[in-house]
Image (cartoon, rainbow, N blue to C red):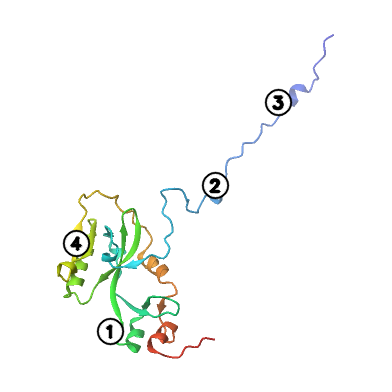
């Protein structure tokens, strides 16, 4: 027995509406974009407070950044005795504040430059800017300039009866990998290193300690 097609079957099929294709919204993925720096190998890590010393105190081969942005202007510092610390702590100090309260011999002036030992062991290098007629300072400055392009090791010549530093270049220019200088500004690195050790006001506890003024400890 043959089943007859309903008369309206053809009409129903012809009136079927095809599914609507939804086009992707422009910028849809923007809100899902990763904005945090990855922490995988090869990615620059955040530098914390850096050691600070002269190039001669590194006791190793050293390079100084050739980038002008990694060399500070001449800055002012003072060494402050701190209770419980074996050594005085170096503080940055506003020059006007320093000159108003302290004798000039207590104010230290020098540059800071970003430096590294082999394999990116970074530190802030003290670069002399005053009393350059002194042979120790002049040879230190020479070493810092050479270290912009070559690995150098600096040692005292006092045992030879010479009041100066000896500058020894690495035997091979490619003895160590080229430094991967951080992209962060030097100012930021100095700020992190001297956090809590900046004297900008006349009643700063560290300044009061230097001038022998009573401190309000309450």
Q: Which residue is mark 1?
A: 105
Q: Mark 1 or 2 closer to N-term? A: 2
Q: Mark 1 or 3 closer to N-term? A: 3
Q: Which residue is mark 4?
A: 167
Can you give x and y, in whole percent of width and height, for residue 200 in the image?
40, 81
Can you give x and y, in whole percent of width and height, for residue 81 in the image?
39, 80
Q: Which quadrant: the C terminus? A: bottom right
Above-or-below relation of 103 to 12: below
Which is more toward the observer, 66 or 109?
Answer: 109
Q: Mark 3 or 4 closer to N-term? A: 3
Choose mark 3 or mark 4, whichever is in front.
4
Q: Quadrant of residue 203?
A: bottom left
Disc 1 is placed on an element classified as helix
Can you give x and y, in whole percent of width and height, for residue 170 in the image?
22, 53
**Outermost left residue:** 161
Marks 3 & 2, CB-CB < 8 Å contact: no
Q: Quadrant of residue 47?
A: bottom left
Q: Which residue is mark 3?
A: 14
Choose mark 1 or mark 2, whichever is in front.
1
Between the residue at mark 3 and the residue at mark 2, the CA separation in whole angstroms equals: 38 Å
Marks 1 & 3, CB-CB < 8 Å contact: no
Disc 2 is placed on an element classified as helix
- Residue at the image position 24 percent from the left and 56 percent from the top: 151
């Amino acid at each position: 027995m043959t089943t007859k097609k309903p008369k309206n079957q053809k009409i129903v099929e012809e009136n079927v509406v095809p599914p609507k294709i939804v086009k992707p919204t422009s910028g849809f993925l923007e809100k899902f974009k990763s904005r945090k720096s990855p922490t995988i190998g090869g990615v620059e890590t955040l530098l914390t407070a850096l050691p600070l010393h002269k190039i001669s105190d590194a006791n190793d081969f050293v390079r100084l950044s050739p980038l002008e942005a990694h060399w500070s202007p001449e800055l002012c510092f003072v060494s402050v005795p701190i209770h419980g610390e074996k050594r005085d702590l170096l503080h940055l100090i506003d020059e006007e504040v320093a000159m108003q309260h302290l004798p000039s011999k207590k104010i230290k002036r020098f540059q800071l430059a970003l430096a590294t030992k082999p394999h990116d062991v970074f530190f802030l290098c003290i670069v002399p800017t005053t009393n350059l007629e002194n042979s120790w300072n002049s040879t230190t400055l020479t070493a810092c300039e050479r270290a912009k392009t070559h690995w150098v090791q600096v040692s005292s010549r006092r045992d030879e009866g010479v009041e100066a530093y000896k500058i020894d270049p690495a035997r091979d220019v490619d003895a160590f990998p080229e430094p991967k200088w951080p992209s962060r500004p030097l100012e930021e690195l100095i700020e992190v290193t001297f956090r809590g050790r900046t004297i900008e006001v006349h009643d700063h506890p560290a300044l009061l300690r230097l001038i022998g003024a009573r401190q309000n400890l309450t």
